[in-house]
Image (cartoon, rainbow, N blue to C red):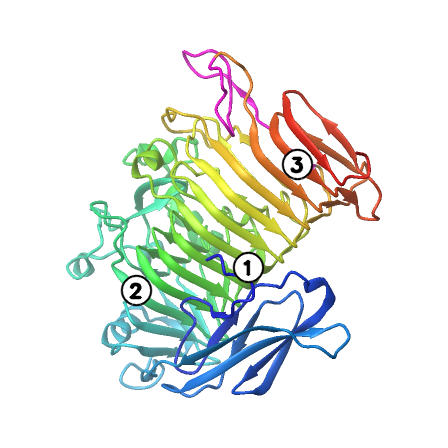
Amino acid sequence: MNNQLNQLIIAPTTLAGTSLTLIWQQPNNHQNIHGYQIFQDNQLIGSVPTSHTYFNVTHLDPETNYLFQVKTTPSDNKIFEDIGSLSVTTKAQGITVDITKPPYAIDPSGQTLSTEKLQQAIDDLPQNGILLIPANAEILSGALDLKSDMTLQIDGTLKGSLNPDDYIYSPKQRLKTTAHVNSDGLILTRYEGWEMACYRSLINAGHLNPQDRTTPNCQNITICGQGTIYGGGNQLGTAMKKIYADKKKYPRYVSDGIGGRRVRGRLISFIQCQNVHLTGITVQNPPCWTIHLIYCDTVTTNGIHIKSQGIDNGDGWDPDSSNNCMIFDTTFDTGDDCIALKSGKNPEGNQINIPCQNIEIFNLEMTSGHGMAIGSEESGGIANVSIHDCLIQGTDSGIELKANAVRGGYIRNVTIRDCQIDSLLVHSVSYNADGKPADHLPHFSKICLENVEIFGNSKDIDVMGHPIAAKNKAVELVGFENPHNPKDNTAYIEQISFDHVRLDNPTNTFFIDKSKNVNLRNAVTRNGDPVSIQFGQNIKNVTIDSHPNS
């Protein structure tokens, strides 16, 4: 997912019969340009500002070759610099089936539950076909299963039923599915780091295969359109929880004391899917998490709006032990984490050992919720995360890298550049510790900030390890790197680079604790004044380079 400088590419999974999305990296001198111009077959088709490194191309013809070029718009408006060029052939276009017309003639008023008819239309759709919910139509449905090589185009509204019974497999449906289904009709999925039986989501694709979690069993799926996927929200989620709140059938679900909480389905769930594209739509009012990607490979999300304000556990976009995921041009108004990168909880996450890696996040706006979380479910590891050109303002935590002390796993190779964020938190957390401890401490490494502006809230940059009391052990510190001496109560954050960081907070203070190999470069306030650098305990190998206080 790390593109080479000045290389123009098509965003993965976005090439279709009549559209595609171009993406590129900013050149080194992007501060000196006004924006970018996009050319199709040597004709100018659009321009974007400097902060935008993507362009959606539409109204193309299927199975046709095109030449695309992107050039900078320099500040002097005289010299253009080529970002790159690309020759591409669009795909063949499948047939479009309007589900409000015969033979399905599904009720467009949203008054009739249409799950069976809608599922039949999906099952009947030929390869590469497009299933259309037209504008002004509202379709009421329970859980649906998408299949490989199809597009679901929603220009109207797909509305989720409020009845939990519409999100389980009936005995008749169990005969057709290859998913793991228990006696209650719940499916095997993953929630908060454990594989467990849950209700189905409104939209489902793929299934969890515990014998082979890395081989895709569903692929080449697009969900697009100008419409809305509207779930059952807290009303549905509460009903799902209530059914299982007093049951002792699933004791591991109530380890946090809240019976039935983990049984809820999501709004959209992809499991062991490959080549998925989500674009254009608004996704709103989930029963808990909004978009959950479990053991997936190559997923691109762009141009969507995620709304889960007021939803209990209303995460926005959650790649969970998934690889090669990209999200951009997306807005969040969430009741929990806008984005949460996950890879399982101890001890199961350590044993399954599938990392969440190669994630690119750019040109986003997060204006509510908790912000962006990397962990704490990171027992399988999280690696190679690029976050750039994002606005994260008005959130609780900004960007937070976190792990419980018993979690194990790692977070490494995280780069945050050209962003405006509320704060950066890199630390251990005490909550969500309800599994057998791992045999090693979490390890955080190679966290890099470049040209990041921090607005400042209760904490601006909080980078520290925390002591823990482990049962039958001496007191340790949760390690972003393991202590060199097992008896040493010191653990360090390693290889942290703060480069061209600006702070905007009342104290203008830069605080670092329990760290080594720290490189501070050009740390200033929003007004360009020197920041006050305060060091806590156990600091090693600090370099202050090109800092006004040095």
Residue 257, visible in the rendered structure: yes
Tag 3: residue type? Asn
Residue 413 within the magenta-colored segment of the rendering: no
Q: In the rendering, at what x and y percent does residue 534 appear?
A: 75, 28
State the image coordinates of residue 154 (x, y, percent, origin top left).
43, 74
Q: Nearer the viewer, residue 269 or 164?
A: 269
| Residue located beneath label 3 in the image | 519
> Badge 2: few (under 14), some or many (20 or more) residues near its Cα, within 10 Å?
many
- The residue wearing badge 2 is 219
Region in magenta: 459-486
Residue at image coords 34%, 34%: 350
Q: Secondary structure at mark 3?
A: strand
Q: SS class of the residue under badge 2?
A: strand
Give the residue number, with chain letter if any, for mark 1. Answer: 307
Residue 224: percent from left, percent from top: 44, 72
In the displayed structure image, the side of residue 31 where residue 403 appears, left or right: left
What residue appears at the point 66 percent right and 36 percent down from the top-left corner?
519
Lower position in the chain sequence, tag 1 or tag 3: 1
